[in-house]
């Protein structure tokens, strides 16, 4: 895994021990070097503050982490340490804290330990296994001080430990991606979809992203500036990205390419990391031409790490961004039908889609009518590849709160609707009837994002870093 994360690392111990037990400090530093190397293997950059064994070093380490602008801090418990050596540091940094309560081995080798004979040597050996001694003390002090933290308990060579460390780093990387994300909001909501309406201020406060409100006129201006050469190059890219149906009218391909070029330039102008959009252009043929040629270009943005959600579903553009930042796609979707014979749920949408999670090459096909919307044009025919998937919804719930709602399932083989939409069938660990009841009961909007792989543990970590509720249906 590659991340853009700076991870602060410091060990804690008690300086009184170093003069009492020969070799103990060297052993603890060696153990910390293993931890440092394992963190670096994830792709993170480690800012190492060394052994913090008195309050003065605690303050100095905090200044180092603040100067380096670390994204996450790993507190490595090397042996017993006084909590007053730790509190000053964590009071001075504002980022997630992961406490590593890691023994050097699965267990003490009791026979070898007891054969040492010298009780001083025996005590020094025991202290190298004494990480769990201070863990409750730290937890108690952090609780009384209002300091959040996440605890990983295990031993140095344990696969579980480093999987958890990698998970926290990945979640931190996605949190950072959200905080640096400019979300474009272009047009207006699909009128009457009250579940889609969002509190943008609340979303900005929760995820740290910036929202840029964009006029459709900005896109029109850029589109008017597109040259024939630009269109030819984009149509070549259509062939690379899509299985272009022979039934696609040449004029529709040309106009969709024109719009796609303009969308690329709009995304570049506003440094967009995500986009939510909807417009109808009633009474203006020029704007209607734009809104009926959006889907190919929006699909190309989505496949280029700028997820685009139709019907101005701002919350879902963030769900798509989360899945995309985890490297798992994130395709715009909604519930299409239930198959009670096969105990499956069908989900899809009329675009845009994420080609990175498609089974085979995505089809670009003519659509004689955009159901529920004006006009006709080109659309996407796509099935999500068979295998594990995660469905994610960003929910705005009562009381002015945001929560993440997720479910793990499988994209499975079987008949799908060939109607010029993304469309796939899914099974879950619970019956389809129970799934839809549980999912709906959680209070989402009717849209969701779909990504490949089992991501619930990572999404849960992200929710904890964001300090918001997380609910997993199955």
Image (cartoon, rainbow, N blue to C red):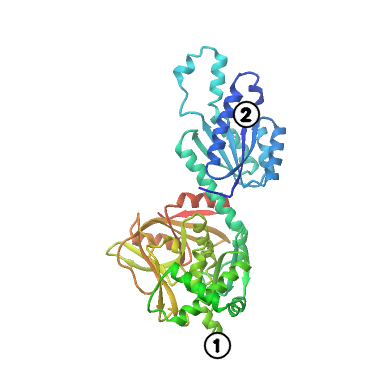
Residue 366, given in percent of the width and then of the height, sits at 40, 78
Q: Which mark is residue 13?
A: 2
SS for dot 2: loop
The residue carrying pointer 1 sits among few (fewer than 14), some (14 to 19) or many (20 or more) residues within 10 Å by Cα, namely few
- The image quarter in which residue 210 lies: bottom right
The residue nearer to you, when weighing 252 against 195, is 252
| Residue 79 visible somewhere in the drawing | no
Q: Position of residue 196 (x, y in %)?
A: 52, 69
Residue found at x 54% / y 79%: 228
- Residue at the extreme top of the image, as rendered: 117
* Position of residue 440 measured from the top left corner of the image (x, y, whole percent): 43, 63
Q: Is residue 341 above or below residue 281?
A: above
- The residue tagged with tag 1: helix, strand or loop? loop
Mark 1 and mark 2: span between their CA atoms? 73 Å
Q: Residues within 10 Å of mark 2 (few under 14, many from 20)?
A: many
Q: Is residue 389 visible?
A: yes
- Vertically, is 173 above or below 209? above
Q: What mark, if any, has residue 238 been given in the picture? A: none
Point out the tag, 1 or 2, that comes first from the N-terminus.
2
Q: Is residue 277 above or below residue 33?
A: below
Q: Position of residue 27 (x, y in %)?
A: 57, 25
Identify the residue position indicated by label 1 in the image: 283
Question: Of residues 348 and 259, which is closer to you in this image?
Answer: 259
Q: Is residue 274 left or right of residue 332?
A: right
Q: Residue at x 59, y 33 (%)?
A: 137
Q: Is residue 272 left or right of residue 407?
A: right
């Amino acid at each position: 895994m590659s991340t853009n994360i700076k991870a602060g690392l410091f060990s804690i111990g008690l300086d009184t021990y170093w003069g009492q037990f020969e070799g103990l400090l060297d052993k603890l530093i060696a153990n910390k070097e293993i931890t440092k190397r394992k963190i670096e293997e994830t792709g993170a950059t480690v800012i190492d503050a060394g052994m913090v064994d008195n309050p003065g070093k605690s303050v100095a380490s905090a200044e180092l982490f603040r100067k380096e602008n670390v994204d996450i801090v790993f507190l490595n418990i090397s042996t017993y340490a006084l909590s007053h050596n730790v509190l000053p540091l964590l009071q001075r940094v504002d980022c997630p804290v992961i406490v590593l309560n890691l023994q050097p081995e699965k267990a003490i080798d009791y026979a070898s330990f007891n054969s040492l004979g010298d009780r001083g040597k025996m005590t020094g050996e025991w202290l190298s296994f004494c990480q769990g001694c201070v863990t409750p003390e730290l937890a108690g002090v952090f609780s009384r001080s209002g300091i959040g933290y996440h605890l990983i308990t295990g031993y140095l060579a344990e696969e579980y430990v480093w999987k958890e460390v990698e998970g926290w780093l990945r979640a931190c990387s996605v949190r950072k991606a959200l905080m640096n994300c400019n979300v474009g909001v272009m047009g207006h909501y699909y009128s009457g979809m009250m579940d889609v309406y969002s509190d943008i201020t609340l979303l900005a406060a929760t995820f740290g992203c910036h929202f840029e409100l964009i006029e459709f006129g900005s896109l029109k201006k850029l589109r008017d500036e597109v040259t024939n050469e630009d269109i030819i190059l984009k149509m070549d890219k259509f062939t690379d990205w899509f299985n272009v149906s022979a039934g696609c009218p040449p004029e529709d391909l040309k106009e969709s390419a024109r719009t796609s070029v303009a969308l690329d330039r709009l995304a570049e102008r506003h440094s967009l990391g995500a986009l939510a959009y909807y417009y109808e252009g009633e009474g203006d043929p020029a704007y209607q031409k734009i809104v009926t040629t959006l889907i190919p270009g929006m699909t190309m943005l989505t496949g280029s790490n700028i997820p685009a959600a139709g019907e101005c579903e701002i919350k879902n553009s963030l769900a798509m961004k989360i899945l995309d930042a985890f490297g798992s796609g994130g395709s715009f979707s909604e519930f299409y039908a239930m198959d009670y014979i096969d105990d499956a749920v069908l989900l899809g949408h009329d675009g845009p889609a994420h080609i990175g999670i498609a089974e085979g090459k995505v089809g670009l096909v003519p659509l004689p009518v955009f159901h529920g919307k004006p006009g006709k044009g080109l659309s996407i025919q796509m099935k999500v590849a068979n295998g594990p998937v995660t469905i994610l919804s960003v929910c705005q719930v009562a009381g002015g709160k945001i929560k993440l709602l997720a479910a793990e399932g499988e994209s499975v083989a079987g008949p799908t609707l060939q109607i010029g939409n993304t469309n796939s069938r899914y099974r879950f660990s619970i019956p389809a009837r129970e799934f839809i009841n549980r999912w709906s009961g959680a209070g989402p909007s009717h849209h969701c994002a779909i990504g490949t792989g089992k991501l619930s543990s990572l999404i849960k970590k992200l929710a904890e870093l964001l300090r918001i509720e997380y609910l997993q249906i199955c």
